[in-house]
Amino acid sequence: MEGCGEEPVKSVGRARGRRTLHLGYDRASGSANNVRARSKIQVVPEDLHEINKKFAAMGIECTDVASLAQHHNLQSLPSTVWTKPKEMTGGTDPVDLEGTVMVEFSLKSNFPRMFVSLAMFPKDVTKQPVNYNDKMKIISHNYVCAILLLHVSSLVLMHHNGMSLIKPINWTTGQLVPLSANYFRLPTVTNWQLYQYRVTFAPSEDSKVAKHKMVHNHKARLGGYLFDGTMLFTSYMYDEDPMILTSARPSDGAAVSVTIRRVGVLAFGDRQYMHVFNILMRHCLQNLHLQQVGRYYYDPVERIAIDRHKLELWPGYVTSIRQHEDELLLCVELTHKVMRQDTVHDLLQECYRSSPADYQHVFKKKILGSIVLTDYNNKTYRVDDVDFSATPQSLFQRNGKAISFLSYFFQKYQLTIRDRSQPMLVSRPKKYDHSSGDDSFIYLVPELCRMTGLTDSMRTNFALMQDLAKCTRLGPSQRMERLQKFNRRLKTDSEVSSELASWNMSMTEMLVSFSGRILPRERITLGMRGRQANVKCDAGLMNDWTKQMSVNPMLTSQEVDSWAVVFPSNMRPHVQQFVLALQLAAANMELRLPKPYDRELHDDHIATYVEALENAVLTCNPKLILVVIPNSRLDRYSAIKKKCCVDVGVPTQVILHRNIIRDNVKSVATKVALQMNCKLGGAPWTVDIPVQDLMVVGFDVYPDNKQGLSIGALVASLDRNMSRYFSAVRYHNTGEELSNELSISICRALGKFMEHNQGYLPQRIVIYRDGVGDGQISYVYQHEVALIKAQLAKIYGNTPYRMAFIIVTKHINTRLFCDGKNPHPGTVVDDVITLPERYDFYLVSQSVRQGTVTPTLYNVISDNVGLDPDKLQRLTYKLTHLYFNWSGTIRVPAPVQYAHKLAYLVGQAIHKIPSANLDEVLYYL
């Protein structure tokens, strides 16, 4: 808080596994068990009735401060009244205080269930004179905090990136389990600050390299610092301000005056503050002599040769430093880069052999944008162009003299270039080279450049991918061992240790450990046999109910009076056998499949398939068409799906010929029968969803490169069992269009919900949004959430409704370990490695048979749904059981996966909006 002499910001702390708020408490002075804090805090508006109304709208009960203080044995003494300034009228936060009362109280350690909510206000409120006798520890450095004591549940009202929401604190459901994660603690000294200085040079200097050298000459005096050419960051506040130094210019030795002037202090936790830490970590990785390839760093010394496929694997590390709940943590994830033994020259020759008349165009199309490796200096470059007018015999200037590439590589690296007429590759300077004043293009010889990454043909090579997986798919114990090895390497390297010590930082040796919870196992509800009750089975420890599914009826089965099978005539015996197996498997699940209408094809051309589909629709009006194809050619698959999904509006089940002749044809038939039932509107199973009048929405985005647009797919539940769904697809070009289309699709989903529920709207709506990066969260909140709320306000009018908007992130670097093994499905983590400014949690919902399981991150950015964290987490876990294409749990709630499948189908295959006839069936499974 500016101008009030506030001490450094404290975040929400921990005591006995619960979150507690440390007020006026310095951790260096003692433990949380003996804290007795006294602080003057803004509390309670003058009009309690108004704030009660505001909190009631968010599902929070609040009584007056006097009764709360009495209940918690607080010493409450009213003090001066402070009226909010006029410029604060109409604040953006949910709680808009008309005034505040200063209350002095004591918070005793024997009240661990003390509940606190924070209302944040912009810092310009401190323009008003306020008399603080004691210093107040605040959670957010940008906001004054009005603290309200609540009794019902532990809550924190956060304001981050323009978002205000209630963050629940205590979670209790589930069995406690000890966990560790791929994080290391980074202890720092008390009252650690990051100072920002501007560095100027007289006379001025353009070369960034020269600037770095002139500043580095005073390393002993400056201590640990980071310098970007203009700004210098350090944990030291220099006595002299400005500090004027003198250095010799590297180019000619002339004296240059270097002035270092303090311009500010970076606030703890802000983006630039964390950016400095991550630059520091990159310096440490460079000190380990790791090679940067793209965004990450790899170790060429530890390369793994896979000679059978002429490949190499470089192990690497993805690192990130961030302020988590209580402290700075370093996240380290393992990665690998595929380096090939074939050269760019090999690719050039291949292009010439396949397209001699147009080889230059073909070669450029394949090589531009690729990353290549040069063995002579172990560096990687991006290929930005190909210069067919240049060859290794071309000359360039070096030290003021002209020299050919042939001579240069022979003199410097003792390399002989065989093909003297090959074109030269061109790489533009990297960002940091450009900023250092090096604008010259880099010319590379194809013969000396190795390819990196995998081609499409390599990805379809099963043996190759299996061999790669053996090296990259590390189990939990292997991963932990590699992480500890990396930690030891950092701690024992003298340069790294010196770098960290100069910043008064260190790194702990062990992975971060904490407690998580395993949520209760779910019971799967199947169909009824005759007049008996629904069959119920336990999901099992690994969440797999495939066996129970194959011998029990499905929850709901659709009547099939007509269906068709389309296949080439040479597959007839195999197709007939498979149809019999399919009918038997369906009968076991009480799905009746009559004899299908057969349509044999005289060839497997695309036009032949399309004509057969049209004839089948006209002949027997099928509810579903089974299509057997010889291979996985995308153009054939796209034509089939486009004809059926767009033109005629009939669900299709496409299956490869090789899959119907497998030894496990019974298992294949069971899965196909299950999919067919879902595509007709049936549901194979469900779990108990105790929340009534609930609609769950999943939303995902996928690019349609053919159209040059993006696809937003929405899937919303229509019944209590989560067995019926409405699907909508919309194209959009900009973020604003996406926001509009999403809100429109939700309105359509509400209309369908009313049709299925006797005209009633859902009382609660939970939206799971996939496809959002960290940098997009603020935009999603300010636009998508705002537009949805505006549309809902129009639809509901004066009828109350509750909504939660949750961002789902699958691609994360966090890994969890339980006693050297993967955590059990249902493991949830909502402390220590989560972020203090977010209402977030990690959930491991799926089981894996190989490798290390990856949790999914859920970030609640808007919430007045009225479900406490336990219920919201359990609901999320329940929904991962309801993806009908897999008789087990998946990584995300089923509506999110359905939305992804729908967006993927449209973006990859049909490139058009599907027929409205299919809106209420899962035709995209």
Image (cartoon, helix red, strand yellow):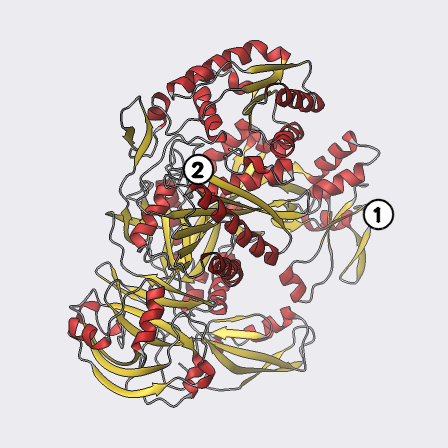
Residue 194 image offset from top left, x and y in percent: 44, 74
Q: Specify which label sits upstream in the sequence, 2 or 1.
A: 1
Q: Residue at x 28, y 30 (%)?
A: 537
In the rendered view, tell whether residue 539 sits above or below residue 300.
Answer: above
Residue 501 image offset from top left, x and y in percent: 40, 67
Question: Closest to the observer: 655 or 485?
Answer: 655
Please name which of the two marks, 2 or 1, marks the residue nearer to the observer: 2
Quick one: which residue is furthest to the top in this view? 573
In the rendered view, tell whether residue 111 sits above or below residue 809.
Answer: below
Question: Closest to the observer: 531 or 341?
Answer: 531
Q: Which residue does the numbered mark 2 point to in the structure image?
A: 724
Q: Amino acid at mark 1?
A: Ser
Quick check: can you spot residue 454? no
Q: Amino acid at mark 2?
A: Arg
Residue 110 image offset from top left, x and y in percent: 15, 68
Tag shown at residue 310? none
Q: Which residue does the numbered mark 1 point to in the structure image?
A: 389
In the rendered view, tell whether residue 920 sits above or below residue 213.
Answer: above
